[in-house]
Image (spheres, grey):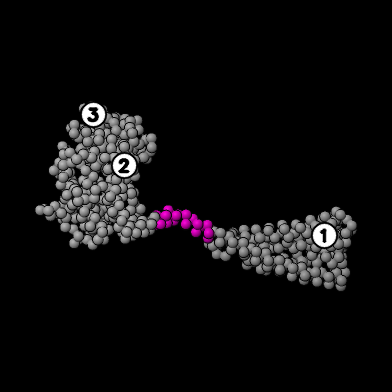
């Protein structure tokens, strides 16, 4: 997101911050706060060598980047700064910060010119901070082995382009954003190419070295060879393993390191590290490619490292899939709950059907006895026959044993469920049962009519229609309403059935 305030990059500015975010120039010194029509300075990170380091906001890509500003007005410093820009711009590797073609530019200030270089911001710790924060007694063997493999691959790319870094040390090796809970897991990135130089066996006029890491030939101004970086990488690995600076382990007379009594390592890796830090360049691995081959030839370490990498990848995928797994559990519980509601609805409907059939049979028997042995029953049947004939306009319908029992079945069914409804589903269940009983009565009535009027096509069609509608529409409606009732009871009783 855009910065809330800006920071002037002019080293001579008396009050570089805070600057209003909408201003294009510094209020105190007049230096521009908007570079190349895209970069906005956010804050100062520190200094490194001859340059000051800032974070800038790229308005085109909506991301943070790193800005290096040359603060020393010396021709040699400018030469090294331009050399770093050219080297980074020519490299395209995940282990090297990305630099775009137009990222090196000159910025005019009221007093002088500032040379600037914008590069990718590596989000993550460097190995020196990682050692202090997480591994004060030394980094694990497998972790250092993985870093050596990655660093040798980066150096192989540099050396094939005839470039030597000349300043490899823990503070110049960074890790991209690592997985939480797994410090040290991530892509290794080599930074600070200010001292990079073309491979040349002739003596160098630029004395650039880091005490404890640079080889003797570099400190004495000798030629620049790939063995220079291999020596510095070996001393860096020993520092990470032992958590002691190389100068503390060095024999002043021979220049060798005495470190194997501090930490126990694989014999092949220990021998390779000793060969990397040999004082004589000819005794070291001849190239980064050869170093990488010897590292990969350490089969036990390679297998253990591969298993550890695969375990980290599996854990990373588990962390990524955790939110989806939680959603899946939520929907699985909802589906199981819905299926349980549907099961209860089916059982309720089946039970209602059994009771309906029982009540209809009882009603049929009771209606037959009433019609056969009482005058009032015959009068009621005749009245019901008249009403049904008027409602359905079915001429010739007779109210025999099929009409009155079906009507009585509805009343019997209502009476059977009325008491149960007081503590069960309430008036909705009674209404559904009455509707089902009435539909059965109509179906029975029409079935009787069809049997008595076989030659009437209209009556045959009507009877079939009623026979089809009763089971197909009645049962799904009953199941749906029962499911709805289950949901309503669950919502209003804190999930209790």
Q: Which residue is mark 1?
A: 446
Mark 2–mark 1 Cα distance, whole angstroms, equals 87 Å
Q: Is residue 75 left or right of residue 361?
A: left
Closest to the camera, between mark 2 and mark 3, is 2
Q: Position of residue 175 (x, y in %)?
A: 30, 49
| First reached walking from the N terminus: tag 2 or tag 3 | 2
What is the span of residues highlighted in magenta in the rendered image? 314-333
Q: CA distance from mark 1 to mark 3?
A: 103 Å
Left or right of 280? Residue 337 is right
Which residue is pictured at 35% across the width and 33% down the height? 38
Q: Is residue 368 left or right of residue 253?
A: right
Alpha-carbon span between mark 2 and mark 3 = 25 Å
Quadrant holding the C terminus:
bottom right
Picture quadrant where residue 81 is located: top left
Q: SS of the residue at dot 2?
A: loop
- Whether residues under marks 2 and 1 lie with C-beta atoms below 8 angstroms apart, the answer is no
Residue 442 in the magenta stretch? The answer is no
Image height of 163 relative to 435, above or below: above
**Mark 3, residue position:** 113
Q: Is residue 166 above or below residue 256?
A: above
Residue shown at 73%/67% (left/top)?
356
């Amino acid at each position: 997101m855009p910065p809330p305030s800006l920071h002037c990059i002019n080293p001579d500015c008396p009050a570089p911050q805070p600057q209003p975010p909408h201003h294009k120039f510094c209020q105190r010194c007049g230096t521009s706060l908007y570079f190349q029509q895209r970069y906005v300075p956010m804050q100062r990170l520190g200094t490194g060598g001859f340059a000051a380091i800032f974070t800038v906001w790229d308005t085109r890509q909506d991301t943070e980047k790193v800005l290096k500003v040359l603060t020393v007005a010396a021709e040699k410093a400018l030469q090294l700064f331009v050399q770093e820009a050219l080297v980074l711009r020519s490299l395209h590797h995940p282990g090297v910060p990305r630099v775009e073609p137009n990222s090196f530019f000159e910025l005019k200030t009221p007093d002088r010119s500032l040379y600037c270089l914008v590069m990718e911001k590596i989000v993550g710790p460097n190995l020196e901070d990682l050692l202090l924060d997480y591994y004060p007694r030394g980094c694990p063997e497998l972790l250092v082995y993985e870093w050596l493999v990655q660093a040798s691959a980066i150096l192989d790319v540099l050396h094939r382009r005839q470039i030597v870094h000349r300043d490899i040390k823990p503070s110049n090796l960074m890790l991209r954003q690592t997985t939480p809970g797994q410090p040290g897991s991530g892509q290794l990135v080599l930074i600070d190419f200010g001292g990079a130089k073309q491979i040349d066996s002739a003596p160098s006029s630029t004395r650039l070295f880091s005490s404890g890491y640079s080889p003797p030939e570099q400190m004495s101004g000798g030629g620049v060879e790939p063995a220079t970086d291999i020596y510095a990488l070996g001393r860096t690995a020993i520092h990470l393993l032992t958590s002691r600076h190389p100068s503390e382990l060095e024999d002043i007379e021979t220049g060798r390191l005495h470190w194997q009594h501090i930490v126990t390592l694989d014999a092949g890796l220990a021998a390779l590290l000793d060969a990397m830090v040999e004082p004589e360049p000819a005794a070291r691995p001849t190239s980064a490619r050869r170093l990488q081959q010897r590292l990969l030839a350490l089969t036990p370490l390679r297998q253990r490292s591969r298993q550890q990498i695969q375990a980290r990848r599996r854990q990373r995928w588990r962390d990524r899939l955790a939110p989806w797994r939680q959603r899946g559990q939520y929907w699985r519980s909802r589906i199981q709950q819905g299926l349980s509601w549907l099961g209860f609805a089916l059982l309720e409907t089946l039970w209602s059907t059994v009771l309906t059939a029982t009540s209809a049979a009882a009603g049929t028997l009771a209606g037959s006895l009433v019609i056969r042995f009482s005058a009032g029953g015959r009068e009621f049947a005749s009245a019901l026959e008249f009403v049904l004939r008027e409602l359905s306009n079915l001429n010739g319908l007779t109210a025999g044993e099929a009409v009155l029992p079906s009507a009585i079945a509805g009343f019997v069914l209502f009476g059977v469920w009325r008491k149960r409804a007081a503590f069960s589903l309430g008036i909705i269940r009674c209404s559904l049962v009455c509707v089902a009983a009435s539909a059965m009565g109509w179906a029975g009535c029409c079935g009787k009519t069809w049997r008595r009027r076989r030659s009437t096509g209209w009556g045959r069609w009507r009877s079939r229609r009623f026979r089809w509608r009763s089971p197909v529409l009645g049962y799904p409606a009953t199941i749906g309403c029962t499911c709805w009732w289950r949901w309503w009871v669950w919502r209003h009783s804190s999930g209790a059935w």
